[in-house]
Image (cartoon, grey):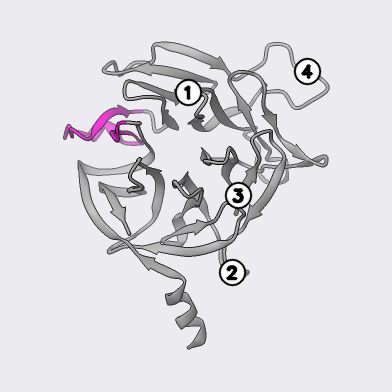
Amino acid sequence: MASTEAQVLSSLVYRIKKTIPLGCRLYVFDVDCSPDGFLCLSAINIGDYKTKSESILFTSPYGRYMAAGSSTDYYCTSVNSVFKVIVPSIFPKIKIWPVHDKKPNPECITNDGYTPQGITVRKTGDVLICLWNNEIGEKSLGKVISTNGILNIFTDKNHPLYVCPTYIAENGNGDICVSDVRAVVVTDAGGMLRFRYQGNSSSSNFDPYGICCDSSCNIIVADTKNDKIHVVDKDGQFLYHVIYHGIKMPRVLCIDRKNNLHVGEWHTDTINVIER
């Protein structure tokens, strides 16, 4: 009984402010809000997408990661590159970062053989990219790089920082927040480890995917398999779970300037816009 009461007290009920219809059920893979509050969307079966919403500026048919740079410029990943996309074109215009190095540096982990995953645009305009080495189990490794070549984050005290980094967000304090296998890994702006958040219970099977940060520097992360959204503060302290009517497998998140949270569930025909 006490455990049940504690769970209830640790949750905050958000209301669904509006829903953005997709016209059919899609496996939503990534979303991001532009500075103007419009949405860019990536889904695996976007070929079935028929409804054109005024709220959605750009869709990716590839089921890849993406990020909004402005109301007209977007970035998306391919197998080995990141592209800049100019709306309203649906085709990548400018390749901005080849992921594979032609001349590996023997002094550090290189990008050779790594695949780009999560991507975000920093306030400076630089782009951060999660990379994964395509290995399974103990051989699985990840890193975070920046397109300006300054950041190459992969170890802490000679221990790997990431197993398979998926989604990434920059916090308002400059921290880099990454959802990894069973953990959210947070480093400072220079890549030094600050903390790992591994769920709010030792018995929980934490499964983080989409991640974003609000105006108070709280970190918000989708816990897909457990049908939860976790909110932790900038120092990794659990605050509460977000719940709303009908929540099921929240996969990706983004937040607009008014702190409205956009939630894309894994298999859905709408994007939910929720608020406290």
Q: Is residue 47 magenta?
A: yes
Tags 3 and 2 touching, CB below 8 Å: no
- Looking at the image, which residue is at 75% across and 16% down? 104
Is residue 260 or residue 48 the one in the foreground? 260
Mark 4 or mark 2: which is in front? 2
Quadrant placement of the C terminus:
bottom left
Q: CA distance from mark 3 to mark 2?
A: 16 Å
Q: Is residue 12 left or right of residue 21?
A: right
Nearer-N-terminus badge (1/2): 1
Three-letter code for the amino acid on which mark 1 is drawn: Ser
Residue that badge 2 annotates: 201
Residue that badge 4 annotates: 105
Nearer-N-terminus badge (3/2): 3
Q: CA distance from mark 1 to mark 3?
A: 22 Å
Q: Does the image show residue 263?
A: no
Please state the horizontal and vertical placement of residue 203, each as a whole percent of the image.
60, 71
Residue that badge 3 annotates: 181
Q: Is residue 4 magenta?
A: no
- Looking at the image, which residue is at 63% across and 27% down? 145
Residue 241 vertical placement versus 173 (above, below): below
